[in-house]
Amino acid sequence: MRTFSVFAALWTLLAVPVQALAAGVQRPIPNPQSATAEFWFFSASVGLLLALAAVHWLVARR
Protein backbone atom coordinates (compact mmCIF):
# COMPACT_ATOMS: atom_id res chain seq x y z
CA MET A 1 0.00 0.00 0.00
CA ARG A 2 2.85 2.31 0.80
CA THR A 3 4.40 1.64 -2.62
CA PHE A 4 1.23 2.88 -4.29
CA SER A 5 1.28 6.14 -2.33
CA VAL A 6 4.94 6.69 -3.25
CA PHE A 7 4.15 6.20 -6.94
CA ALA A 8 1.12 8.49 -6.64
CA ALA A 9 3.26 11.19 -5.02
CA LEU A 10 5.94 10.87 -7.73
CA TRP A 11 3.32 10.98 -10.48
CA THR A 12 1.79 14.12 -8.97
CA LEU A 13 5.18 15.81 -8.76
CA LEU A 14 5.90 14.95 -12.39
CA ALA A 15 2.48 15.92 -13.71
CA VAL A 16 2.17 19.35 -12.05
CA PRO A 17 4.94 21.11 -14.06
CA VAL A 18 3.54 19.76 -17.33
CA GLN A 19 0.12 21.20 -16.55
CA ALA A 20 1.66 24.54 -15.63
CA LEU A 21 3.26 24.81 -19.08
CA ALA A 22 0.06 24.07 -20.98
CA ALA A 23 -1.10 26.72 -23.42
CA GLY A 24 -4.40 28.49 -22.91
CA VAL A 25 -7.40 27.21 -24.82
CA GLN A 26 -8.95 29.51 -27.40
CA ARG A 27 -12.66 28.99 -27.83
CA PRO A 28 -13.83 28.34 -31.40
CA ILE A 29 -16.00 30.97 -33.05
CA PRO A 30 -19.15 29.40 -34.55
CA ASN A 31 -19.96 30.03 -38.19
CA PRO A 32 -23.13 31.96 -39.02
CA GLN A 33 -26.15 29.99 -40.24
CA SER A 34 -26.76 29.90 -43.97
CA ALA A 35 -30.14 30.68 -45.51
CA THR A 36 -30.54 27.02 -46.47
CA ALA A 37 -29.98 25.89 -42.89
CA GLU A 38 -32.51 28.42 -41.62
CA PHE A 39 -35.07 27.23 -44.18
CA TRP A 40 -34.69 23.58 -43.14
CA PHE A 41 -34.84 24.49 -39.44
CA PHE A 42 -38.07 26.42 -40.08
CA SER A 43 -39.47 23.48 -42.08
CA ALA A 44 -38.62 21.04 -39.30
CA SER A 45 -40.18 23.36 -36.70
CA VAL A 46 -43.43 23.58 -38.65
CA GLY A 47 -43.44 19.81 -39.13
CA LEU A 48 -42.95 19.28 -35.40
CA LEU A 49 -45.81 21.63 -34.56
CA LEU A 50 -48.10 19.87 -37.05
CA ALA A 51 -47.17 16.49 -35.57
CA LEU A 52 -47.88 17.75 -32.05
CA ALA A 53 -51.23 19.13 -33.18
CA ALA A 54 -52.09 15.79 -34.81
CA VAL A 55 -51.23 13.87 -31.64
CA HIS A 56 -53.30 16.29 -29.56
CA TRP A 57 -56.26 15.85 -31.92
CA LEU A 58 -55.96 12.05 -31.84
CA VAL A 59 -55.66 11.86 -28.05
CA ALA A 60 -58.48 14.38 -27.44
CA ARG A 61 -60.90 12.25 -29.52
CA ARG A 62 -60.63 9.32 -27.09
Image (cartoon, rainbow, N blue to C red):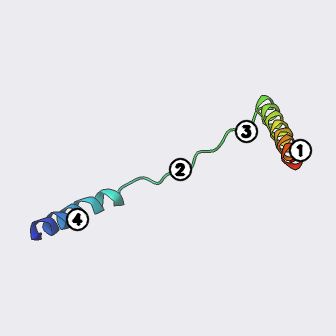
Could you tell me which secondary element the residue under label 3 belongs to? loop
Q: Measure the C-alpha gap from mark 2 to mark 4.
A: 27 Å
Question: As shown in the figure, which amino acid type bears the numbered disc 4?
Answer: Leu
Question: As shown in the figure, which amino acid type bears the numbered disc 2?
Answer: Gln
Residue ID for mark 3: 32
- Which label sits on residue 33? none
Left-right relation of 57 to 7? right
Left-right relation of 62 to 17? right
- At horizontal 34% and vertical 58% (from top left) the residue drawn is 19
Q: Measure the C-alpha gap from mark 2 to mark 3.
A: 18 Å
- At horizontal 42% and vertical 52% (from top left) the residue drawn is 23
- At horizontal 46% and vertical 54% (from top left) the residue drawn is 24
Up-down relation of residue 33 to residue 11 (above or below): above
The mark nearer the N terminus, 2 or 3, is: 2
- Which label sits on residue 13? 4
- Which label sits on residue 57? 1
The mark nearer the N terminus, 1 or 2, is: 2
In this rendering, which labeled residue sits more in front, label 1 or label 2? 1
Residue ID for mark 2: 26
Q: Quadrant of the N terminus?
A: bottom left
The mark nearer the N terminus, 2 or 4, is: 4
The mark nearer the N terminus, 4 or 3, is: 4
Residue at the bottom extreme of this rendering: 2
Q: Say if mark 2 contacts mark 3, CB within 8 Å.
A: no
Quarter of the image where one finds residue 9: bottom left
Quarter of the image where one finds residue 45: top right
- At horizontal 88% and vertical 49% (from top left) the residue drawn is 60
Question: As shown in the figure, which amino acid type bears the numbered disc 1?
Answer: Trp
Q: Say if mark 4 contacts mark 3, CB within 8 Å.
A: no
In this rendering, which labeled residue sits more in front, label 1 or label 3? 1
Q: Say if mark 4 contacts mark 1, CB within 8 Å.
A: no
